[in-house]
Amino acid sequence: MKQSYFDIVSNTALTDNVYKMVLRGDTSAITAPGQFVNIKLEGMFLRRPISVCDVAGDTLTIIYKVVGKGTEAMSRMTAGKLDILTGLGNGYDLTVSGEKPVLLGGGVGVPPMYKLAKELIAQGKKVSVILGFNTKNEIFYEHEFKALGADVYVTTVDGSYGMKGFVTDALKNIDYTYFYTCGPEPMLKAVHRASATSGQMSFEERMGCGFGACMGCSCKTLTGYKRICKEGPVMRKEEILWEN
Ligand SMILES: Cc1cc2nc3c(=O)[nH]c(=O)nc-3n(C[C@H](O)[C@H](O)[C@H](O)COP(=O)(O)OP(=O)(O)OC[C@H]3O[C@@H](n4cnc5c(N)ncnc54)[C@H](O)[C@@H]3O)c2cc1C
Ligand code: FES
């Protein structure tokens, strides 16, 4: 974990309430797709955890949805510096993907799939990406994933774009060797049930300290309690115990 200051390079709206922020600073502690950063905001005690969407040299990209006080404050920032903890969380293990991994992202679970897709494609893997949203106006990053060379499928719950339904509906038509996913918990549960292979899922749970000290994020697994922020946020399909 590293604490440092990043300069805000840009902060642009992708949809009505989802923003992409590009930052410049010391990214050396970020070692795997699926890790997250924890951002300190003026006047707020708890940092806000946001997944790494992309890293290239000293440039870090994050994508966030405005849901409350912190993300609303972020959406108004155009310049300046942010105090950020980097190198948090375990990230996805790419060594087990097989030749045809499928990546499923739902809503703000889409961003961490980007860096993951980029790295798997760089390794020569045939990557399929399923992006799930409620409706057409919420869609972002479809073209960015296509530009990487992934086979991209979009689902919308109301059928206003792409396939009508959930990411699991699109999954039925794909030939894959392994899955990686991130999204709201009901989606993770559905993917857990519907998937035909092993896989890994990232939990975007509520967090306190963000670096393993408060136990505020612990969840039960087959091998005992784990802290989402420290031993996660990525868990293997086989170790997950759903509590309800
Ligand atoms: C590992 C991880 C990765 C995440 N990645 C992303 C991402 O890439 N893009 C994105 O839009 N969102 C992401 N989230 C969710 C994001 O952290 C929350 O939406 C954000 O903290 C809300 O802050 P707020 O002040 O706007 O909302 P408020 O509801 O006002 O926040 C109040 C408090 O609750 C906490 N909180 C609220 N919702 C969440 C939540 N879902 N998860 C964790 N803490 C929460 C805040 O940190 C804060 O301490 C991620 C969460 C985790 C744990
Ligand atoms: S948030 Fe404090 S231990 Fe995970």
Image: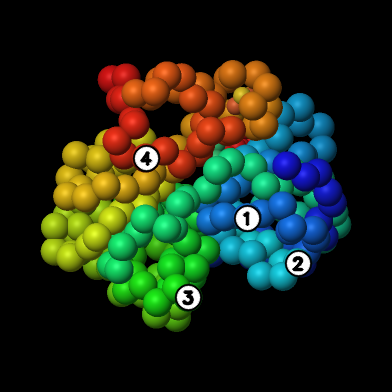
Relative to residue 105, is residue 230 drawn left or right? right
User: Cα distance, mark 3 to mark 2?
Assistant: 19 Å
**Residue under numbered circle 2:** 58
Q: What element carries label 2?
A: loop
Label 3 vs label 2, nearer the camera: 3
**Residue under numbered circle 4:** 236
Amino acid at dot 2 = Asp
Q: As displayed, is residue 46 above or below residue 197?
A: above
The residue depicted at 32 percent of the width and 74 percent of the height is 126
Amino acid at dot 4 = Arg
Judge the density around disc 1: few (<14), some (14-19), many (≥20) Cα neighbours within 10 Å.
some
Q: As displayed, is residue 70 above or below residue 106?
A: above
Label 1 vs label 2, nearer the camera: 1
Mark 3 or mark 2: name the one nearer the start of the chain.
2
The residue depicted at 83 percent of the width and 49 percent of the height is 4
**Residue under numbered circle 3:** 122
Q: As displayed, is residue 211 above or below residue 114?
A: above
Residue 117 placement: quadrant: bottom left
Q: Is residue 143 visible?
A: no
**Residue under numbered circle 1:** 31
The residue depicted at 68 percent of the width and 62 percent of the height is 60
Please name whichever residue, 75 or 223, is drawn nearer the observer in this view of the structure.
Answer: 223
Mark 1 or mark 2: name the one nearer the start of the chain.
1
Residues marked 4 and 3 touching at CB (< 8 Å): no
Q: Can residue 238 be seen in this view?
A: yes
Q: Position of residue 168 (x, y in %)?
A: 21, 51
